[in-house]
């Protein structure tokens, strides 16, 4: 074991420059990916914060019948996306309106009839395609008799949600391409590391080393490259995130209270590290498979 | 026990390096393998430790059928064999001591044993005083003795020595020959390839002669 680690480090030492360049490349690639991730995470939180406030308000006609009302309530209660439903009667709406605008009370109290409709206000459970579901449900409700009109929050949030789906696909595509590129880079570094010690490895095999004994230091070397690159990238992104937070926290607060520029969540940090280690291992595995075939001519 | 049956081998070209070779060597036997340059001595030795494939025939070493051993299990054959390579194959980046110890390391011996065995092997070839030198700082003969020490350090059952005294003066050659003969006394099978007819005549060992890939006498 100790021996294996020594061999790994002497491998790295005899091939230092390529090793470092390889790590730098991995760092840069993972930083790019990580920055996209940070942007994605923050946009997503932003979207979530806003969409918590989104509700679908169903305004009812004054002449709605009890049957029609029951039908509506049934329809709403069987929709599993709906989190809660509150009925606001004409009177309650009027009271609320008057409370809000108490300053202008002379004008309002002059009105001798109540101009506000009664309504249901629906909250929805969080879901990735929440807006699509709200829109579809709104379309359905609007065709019901007794429904005067519908209103659901900021429509632009719907477009924003679509954009997030696009970003997700984009991240996946960029991520896969970078992963393939990195695997090739690491496999190339390992190949160079092998060539710099080819005589030694051939001798090892000739005097009775097992193929596994020869392979393991290279696997560790690849793994180390991936891990070091991954950690360096995470640190770099952290620095960028802190910078943005201190520079722009004020302007973020002005857009939405309580929002702050976040780092990648813990679970994703682990995913990034696991991926980088795996890519390192895969890269060296690929090149080891190639060069251990020269054992017997 | 080493047995060869009708072994033939051709490298890329047209002229075969070995033609229909059949002979056997008993366990604990010492044989000289000789013949002019290009006769096929090195090729024969390479086949015996699985460093070169052959086209036809059967080769058995200590009951192992060489042609049938898969690459990933060749190490079990090679651990029974100590090879003195004709071109030494010393690692220039490692010291004399490290070069010899290397043969122990790669088969996973523990540190204490490595130190003791390496020292003993260097003592046998008279090179303890050069243990911290690097191969490029040694004379040809000294390098050759490092290669011999490395072949002996694992106490192999078989020793394949390819021109182990080619670069040594008569006095040291005799010392090395005696070292191999002492090793033979412990039951080790030895194939000693050499051009040195004088050395062959001075001893009573069996002689296998190759010429242009053919077995001339044994
Ligand atoms: N790797 C190779 N590729 C092609 N031909 C080879 C190779 N190795 C050896 N040969 C040829 O095979 C023949 C036998 O070579 P080999 O090295 O076995 O001879 P040898 O008896 O060891 O000679 P020497 O006494 O000079 O060491 C030679 O004609 C040589 O040119
Ligand atoms: Mg030869």
Image (cartoon, rainbow, N blue to C red):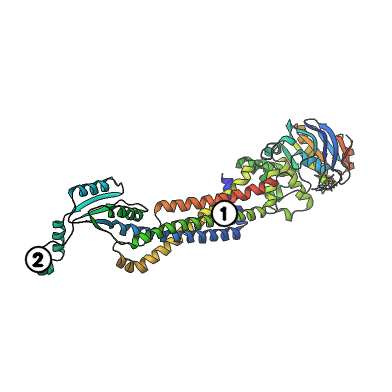
Q: Is residue B126 visible?
A: no
Report the residue marked by disc 2. Answer: A109
Q: Residue A60's spot in the image, x, y percent? A: 21, 55
> Which is nearer the N-term, disc 1 or disc 2?
2
> Residue at horizontal 45%, vertical 60%?
A36
Q: Hey, which quadrant is residue A234 in on the image?
A: bottom left
Quarter of the image where one finds residue B66 = top right
Element type at marker 1? helix
Residue A64 shown left or right of residue B57 in the figure: left
Residue at coordinates 30% horizontally, 62% vertically from top-left?
A: A154
Residue A30 percent coordinates (x, y): 49, 58
Most foreground residue, A265 or B137: A265
Q: CA distance from mark 1 to mark 2?
A: 74 Å
Residue at left offset 59%, top offset 50%: A284
Q: Label 1: few (<14), some or many (≥20) within 10 Å?
A: many
Q: Ligand 2 lies in which image quarter?
A: top right
């Amino acid at each position: 074991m100790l021996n294996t680690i020594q061999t790994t480090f002497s491998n790295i030492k005899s091939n230092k420059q390529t090793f470092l360049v390889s790590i730098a490349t991995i760092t840069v690639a993972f930083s790019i990916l990580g920055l996209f991730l940070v942007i994605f995470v923050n946009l997503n939180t932003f979207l979530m914060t806003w969409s918590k406030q989104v509700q679908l308000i169903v305004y009812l006609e004054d002449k709605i019948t009890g049957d029609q009302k029951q039908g509506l309530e049934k329809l709403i209660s069987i929709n599993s996306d709906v989190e809660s439903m509150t009925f606001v009667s004409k009177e309650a709406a009027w009271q609320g309106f008057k409370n809000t605008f108490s300053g202008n009370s002379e004008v309002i109290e002059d009105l001798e009839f109540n101009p506000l409709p009664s309504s249901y206000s629906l909250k929805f459970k969080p879901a990735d395609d929440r807006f699509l579901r709200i829109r579809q449900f709104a379309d359905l409700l609007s065709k019901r008799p007794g429904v005067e009109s519908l209103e659901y929050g900021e429509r632009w949030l719907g477009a924003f949600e679509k954009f997030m789906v696009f970003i997700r696909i984009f991240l996946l595509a960029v991520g896969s391409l970078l992963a393939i590129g990195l695997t090739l880079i690491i496999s190339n570094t390992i190949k160079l590391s092998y060539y710099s010690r080819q005589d030694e490895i051939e001798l090892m095999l000739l005097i009775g080393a097992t193929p596994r004994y020869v392979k393991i230091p290279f696997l560790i070397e690849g793994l180390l490259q991936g891990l070091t690159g991954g950690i360096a990238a995470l640190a770099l992104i952290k620095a960028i995130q802190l910078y943005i937070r201190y520079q722009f926290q004020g302007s973020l607060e002005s857009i939405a209270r309580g929002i702050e520029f976040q780092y990648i969540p813990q679970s994703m940090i682990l995913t990034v590290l696991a991926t980088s280690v795996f890519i390192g291992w895969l890269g060296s595995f690929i090149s080891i498979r190639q060069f251990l075939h020269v054992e017997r001519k | 026990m080493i047995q060869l049956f009708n072994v033939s081998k051709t490298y890329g070209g047209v002229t075969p390096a070995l033609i229909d070779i059949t002979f056997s060597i008993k366990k604990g036997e010492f044989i000289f393998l000789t013949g002019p340059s290009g006769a096929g001595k090195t090729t024969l030795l390479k086949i015996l430790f699985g460093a070169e494939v052959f086209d036809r025939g059967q080769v058995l070493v200590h009951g192992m059928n060489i042609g049938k051993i898969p690459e990933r299990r060749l190490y079990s054959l090679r651990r029974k064999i100590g090879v003195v390579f004709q071109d030494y194959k010393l690692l220039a980046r490692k010291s004399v001591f490290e070069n010899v110890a290397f043969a122990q390391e790669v088969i996973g011996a523990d540190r204490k044993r490595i130190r003791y065995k390496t020292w003993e092997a260097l003592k046998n070839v008279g090179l303890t005083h050069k243990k911290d030198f690097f191969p490029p700082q040694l004379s040809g003969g000294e390098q050759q003795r490092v290669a011999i020490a490395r072949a002996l350090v694992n106490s192999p059952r078989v020793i394949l020595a390819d021109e182990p005294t080619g670069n040594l003066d008569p006095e040291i050659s005799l010392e090395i020959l005696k070292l191999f003969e002492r090793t033979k006394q412990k039951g080790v099978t030895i194939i000693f390839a050499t051009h040195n007819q004088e050395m062959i005549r001075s001893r009573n060992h069996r002689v296998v002669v190759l010429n242009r890939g053919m077995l001339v006498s044994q």
